[in-house]
Amino acid sequence: MVTGPIQQPSVAPPAVRPPAARRPSPPSPPAGDLPALARALAVPPGEPRWRERVIVHLTPVRRGFAEHVRITEGPAGLYAEVLAQAPRLHRGVRLLTREHAAIVAALADLQRAVERPGVCAEELRRRIDDLLRALSRHRQRGADLLWQAYQTDLGGET
């Protein structure tokens, strides 16, 4: 017969709790203010200063993407952490790294094209649309990679 209340903590004291699994912070957006660039693109090209607006909004996208590459690549980057956690994702990391090089080149090429007055506005719009789609796909692939690294349960544990 129990004469007193049974004390069972419903939650372990903070000193006893196991530390939370270390997970990387979510990836930074790969490139500056993409919606602002899309809005600048939506303005009719006949509007005064259309090219200047596009250039103004393209510059932060280039800077933002350069920062994204810096954070994700390298020995202390996010991709190194992903590979330490899930070496099976080497192919996905390699794909994203190759995309970085292609997107950086496309951004530089686009910057030069926007600054040349001889390039028609429709050509610039097509190229910027292509870039926005490439950035969107890259962002999704990066999110998928992180999900695979930190959320996929491969089983085997009980």
Image (tube, rainbow, N blue to C red):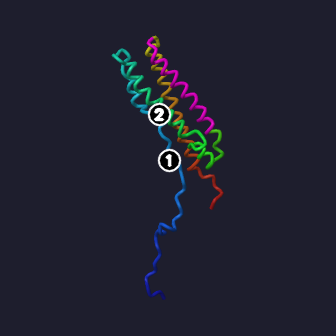
From the viewer's perspective, is the residue at label 1 or at label 2 nearer?
Answer: 2
Q: Which mark is residue 139?
A: none
Q: Which residue is mark 1?
A: 25
Q: Which residues make up the magenta segment?
A: 93-117
Element type where label 1 sits in the image: loop
Q: Which residue is mark 2?
A: 64
Element type where label 2 sits in the image: helix
- Left or right: residue 33 versus residue 146 is left
Q: Is residue 151 above or below residue 65?
A: below
> How many angstroms separate mark 1 from mark 2 (CA)?
17 Å
Residue 154 x/y as whole percent: 63, 52
The residue located at (52%, 21%) in the rendering is: 109
Amino acid at the residue labelled 1: Ser
Q: Is residue 158 above or below residue 44?
A: below
Residue 85 x/y as whole percent: 61, 49
- Left or right: residue 151 versus residue 57 is right
Q: Quadrant of residue 32?
A: top left
The residue located at (42%, 32%) in the rendering is: 33
110 in the magenta segment:
yes
Q: How many marks?
A: 2
Mark 2 and mark 1 in contact (Cβ < 8 Å)? no
The residue located at (57%, 42%) in the rendering is: 77
Residue 41 at least partly seen: no
